[in-house]
Image (cartoon, grey):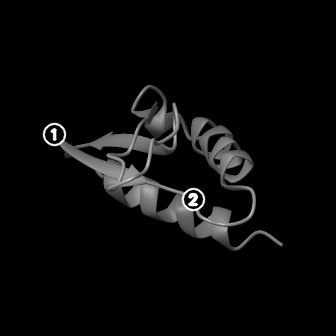
Amino acid sequence: MVRVWLSVEGDDAVEGLAELSEWLRQENELRGLVTPGAAVPGPGELGALADVLVAAVGSGGVISVLAASLKAFLAQP
């Protein structure tokens, strides 16, 4: 199983991560495979409770579904 770590950067990264999480939950093939996680903080950083999403992908085209969903998410106005 491969884990893909997804993070959001910007002025409101927490809200962006929540929106991305909600978006990915709409994909039937990704249900139960995307969970909140904590990135490893850099030197001098405390980190947040959930500042990344971790997608557990394996065979069966799940990575393709994730890529297509991310493309659609990023194309939103």
Callout 2, which amino acid?
A: Val
Marker count (numbered): 2
Residue extending farthest to the right is 77
**Label 1: which residue?**
1
Q: Nearer the viewer, residue 65 or 19?
A: 19
Residue 37 is situated, as x and y percent measured from the top left of the image, at: 42, 34
Q: Residue furthest front?
A: 44
Q: Is residue 35 left or right of residue 25?
A: left
Which numbered dot is residue 8? 2
Q: Residue furthest top?
A: 32
For the residue pair 16 and 28, the one nearer the viewer reads as 16
Residue at figure coordinates x 67%, y 38% from the top left = 22
| Residue type (three-letter) at the residue carrying disc 1 | Met
Residue at (66, 55) in percent of width and height = 13
Residue at disc 2, secondary structure: loop
Q: From the viewer's perspective, is 23 left or right of 27?
A: right
